[in-house]
Image (cartoon, rainbow, N blue to C red):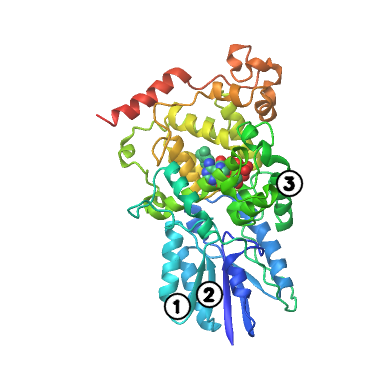
Amino acid sequence: MQHRLIWFRDDLRVNDNAALSAALDCQCDVAISAVFLSADSDWKDFHYGRNRLYYTEQLLRNLSEQLAALGIVLEVVRLDSYQAQVTWVAGYCESRSVTDLFLNQEYQWNERIRDHQIVERLPDVTVHTYVDRVLMQPGTVLTGDNRYYSVFSPFKRRWLSIYQEHATGVFDFAGHSRESIKPSAWDPICDQPDSDLSLFPTTESDARALLDEFVTQRLTNYEANRNNPSVLGTSRLSGALARGLLSPRQCVQAAEVTLNRPITEFPSHAFSWINELIWRDFYQHLLVGFPDLSKNKAFRPETERLRWRNNPLDIEAWKNGRTGIPIVDAGMRELATTGWMHNRVRMIVAQFLTKNLLCDWRIGEAHFMKYLVDSDLGSNNGGWQWSASTGTDAAPYFRVFNPVSQGETHDPDAEYVTRFIPELASVPIKKRHSPWSATLPDRYPAPIVDLKSSRQRAIDAFKELKS
Ligand SMILES: Cc1cc2nc3c(=O)[nH]c(=O)nc-3n(C[C@H](O)[C@H](O)[C@H](O)COP(=O)(O)OP(=O)(O)OC[C@H]3O[C@@H](n4cnc5c(N)ncnc54)[C@H](O)[C@@H]3O)c2cc1C
């Protein structure tokens, strides 16, 4: 009899799960088991934090119940490293006579090496791998001479021109009649988050409801509202997408059904949301095309010579939301209290750290990894290197965001900053993005840096690289 093992990773759902639906697609008598493996110390090296791990734990509990209803046991095993995962899977397959291993592809360097090793270690097991994390498999969207794109716009044009021929649609959840069993038990991979994670859906049906609510009620205004952090203008699906509670295919399908047309015919206000899903694909492509990105290296090697200041007091003030620049502090407090931060504000705080404070982007990248529930190497590294002007298609080094005007433009009524910095409530609304121009409230610090001279200092540091 065949024995099929499904190895879950950041794909913690039963609906539209490419590997799961392939494993279930069999009329024959087959044993099916499922596993999720941690890699505790390797994950620590990559700064996986308690928010991400606690959220994963919650999704695993729900997945385990859903699988149990299908008669499948999910084993959750605590391991130390990716190497230990290879050994464990090899041992499991040998001792349980596994004939087929089903898994969805991951694109970070260590994960790819691990999956390669698994195939080598198990010559007698058929390893089936699937595209699940992205809309288009890395390696599909290439330049005319078969290289990976490093600039987003041509990547997107190519992506759109071939999407229809590659789109798989959502995978049916094959109706599977097995007797249900009791969900398994395990030692939690994390029992306490750092933040209040109530923002994030933890069941597939809640994630689906959030997606449906977004595409039917908020997609039309996405373009108009997406940059304003005080309103609920974006989908807030990033945690669900990052941990695989939802798939990007489900997102596209839901939007297409609502608008009753393919994404290539979307009006621009709705297409801008799809554009973000293409950015997401772009960053996964980059991980495969440029493996150094997974190894803590800058995309532009010359920027490794940059003389970062890395002042410990500045870094602490930034992390704690005590820089005296309201939009930066609000963003950092939003991150600490909710495990999420609005995209516009992520860009602002990242530019502030890397330009005004001239701190190495890796410090910010690690801090985000530690707190974000949606932490993802591709998108996080991409966002940080974009902001620091060290990456692909990055912001030009001389275009430094001014956090005060960014705040005034995108949070015009100062609602967002007041929500996260209640001390500012006594300052007139018009001055809340630059409270030092009024009387500073008692408990709020003066700016730790002069915005004008620190901007020039960053530009000079980048210019120095050319000489
Ligand atoms: C410095 C920095 C770090 C970031 N780190 C991460 C990260 O670790 N994980 C992560 O998922 N996103 C990251 N982003 C991208 C973006 O900020 C979040 O995906 C977005 O804020 C999520 O909110 P949402 O779900 O409401 O997005 P929506 O605007 O509704 O977008 C829909 C989905 O598209 C994807 N997406 C949106 N914007 C981007 C983008 N700029 N790049 C890549 N994918 C995008 C997300 O999966 C998101 O859920 C980062 C951005 C910056 C500037």
Assess whether mark 2 and mark 1 are in contact (beta carbons under 8 angstroms): yes
Q: Give the percent coordinates (x, y) of residue 396.
A: 40, 31
Q: Is residue 124 above or below residue 184?
A: below
Asked whether 316 or 210 is in front, the reply is 210
- Work out whether residue 182 or residue 185 is closer to the camera in this orientation and state it: 182
The tag earlier along the polypeptide, 1 or 3, is 1
Residue located 45% across and 78% down the image: 122
Q: Is residue 463 visible?
A: yes
Mark 3 Cα within 10 Å, few/some/many (few <14, many 20+)?
Answer: few
Mark 2 neighbour density, 10 Å: few (under 14) some (14–19) many (20 or more): many
Whole-percent x, y for residue 129 in the image: 50, 68
Give the residue displayed 47% in from the left and 64% down from the top: 82
Residue hosting label 2: 101
Q: Which residue is mark 3?
A: 213
Give ligand 1's quarter of the image: top right
Task: Tell me which numbered mark, 1 or 2, is placed earlier along the sequence.
Answer: 2
* Residue 35 percent across, percent down from the top left: 59, 70
**Residue 404: mark:** none
Q: Secondary structure at mark 1?
A: loop
Residue kind at label 1, given as amino acid type? Leu
Quadrant of the image containing the C terminus:
top left
Ligand 1 within 8 Å of the CB at mark 1? no
Q: SS for tag 2? A: strand
Q: Amino acid at mark 3?
A: Glu
Say if 460 sits above or below 212 in the image.
Answer: above
Cα–Cα span, label 1 and label 2: 10 Å
Residue 368 visible? The answer is no
Look at mark 1 in the image and give the residue it sits on.
Answer: 122
